[in-house]
Image (cartoon, grey):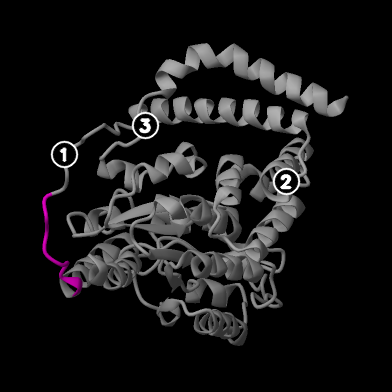
Amino acid sequence: MKKLQAFGLALLLFLCTATGLHVLAGRRLEFNDPKFNAWVNDEKLLYSRAICENLGPNTIPVFGSSEFRHGRSTPYHAAKVLSGQPFQLMLIGAGYYQSLFHATALAAIGPAMEQDQAVLILSPQWFKPSGVLPEVYTSRFSEYNFVQMLKNDKLSQQTKEYIIQRTKQLLEPDPAMGERVELYERVLVTKDASLWDKLHYKAWTTFLEEKMTVGLLLKAKAAGIRHDAPQPTPRPAPDWAALETQADADGAKANTTNQFGMNDDFYFLYKNTMLKSKKDSMKQADYTQSPEYGDLICFLNVCRDLGIRPLLVSLPVNGPWYDYMGFPQQNRQAYYQKIRDIAAEYGAELADLSTEEYTPHFFEDNTHIAWKGWVKLNESLYRFAAPAA
């Protein structure tokens, strides 16, 4: 009875919206607009079909988190520094998007990728002992991407099983979503779905795709993303030394009053809200034991299954800030070494920026890169992507 009710609801939603949405949903999602590649929006991140339709022959997906929203107004963001190169970067991620989301998304877009390269930018804060929290993962979960991952025949059963079980575990705060995940598993993996399951699956996924298409098109229009927008003018390789010099100068102007190397605006915000409470607050902190490592390895296993060459970018922590919080230096170094070991074991290239903890003008705040941080990251991306262009 419960399954019948669920199917009836899905069918009702589908019938009520299909007629009104179908005309708009039939529009193409291929924009040919560089703005789309750098766009940080849930409608894009949760809808792998839109990403797939905008992957060109020289497009490399770059997975990360909140750093993509920082520095967009400066000349140092990757969307600006690497514009006009013979490759394009598809930025995928925002705050709290972590390894498991990215493993699922990579598996979903894999069949559409013409390049055999992918980048994952690692934030040390992902590797807290708790890993990604269920409430956070639930808010970032994409059932559309999950379904496309399950449909990818090149993905090994072992990798699929890890994603399925870990997803179920993290979706406990949303029982309804968890039930749909089990439905998708019965239809696409175990093949023991009932007739009602199959009808429910068809009705719901059809409704979901049309709803997501309409949402994306409306948000893209509001963001000024156009179909067939002008392409960037080809540019020579960036002058990294000149960019570093410029970044130092701009960073010095923005950071004049604090010892943490932050933008002064962020420093005064922290000073008024949290500075005293953070003193020595991380004396026992350790980033070497976390379920996030299993999720990272899953991402690398997706790369292995699909024949994708991965680059891991190991970002540092803000050294002065983490010293202030009492995070032991030896524990920080143990984390960096663990990332090096995993990269070596799973055949990933590594851009190791861990030595930049104390580099002036590397950070915007207590965690996010800016100025020289973006220059160093962009140079790592360029050196990885340029040979394939």
The residue identified by callout 3 is 220
Q: Nearer the viewer, residue 36 or 308?
A: 308
Q: Please state the total of marks drawn on the protein image.
A: 3
Mark 3, secondary structure of its residue: helix
- The amino acid marked with disc number 3 is Ala
Q: Residues within 10 Å of mark 1 (few under 14, many from 20)?
A: few
Residue 282 shown left or right of residue 115 in the figure: right
Mark 2, secondary structure of its residue: loop
Q: Nearer the viewer, residue 40 or 361?
A: 40
- The amino acid marked with disc number 2 is Lys
Q: Name the residue located 48 percent from the left edge and 54 percent from the top edge.
A: 66
**Snapshot quadrant of residue 338:** bottom right
310 magenta-colored: no
The residue identified by callout 2 is 191
State which tag comes first along the sequence, 3 or 1. Answer: 3
Q: Position of residue 121 (x, y in %)?
A: 45, 65
Q: Name the residue located 77 percent from the left edge and 25 percent from the top edge.
A: 6
**Snapshot quadrant of residue 181:** top right
Q: CA distance from mark 1 to mark 2?
A: 46 Å
State which tag comes first along the sequence, 1 or 2. Answer: 2
Q: Position of residue 211 (x, y in %)?
A: 53, 26
Q: Do the CB atoms of the residues marked 3 and 2 lie less than 8 Å apart?
A: no
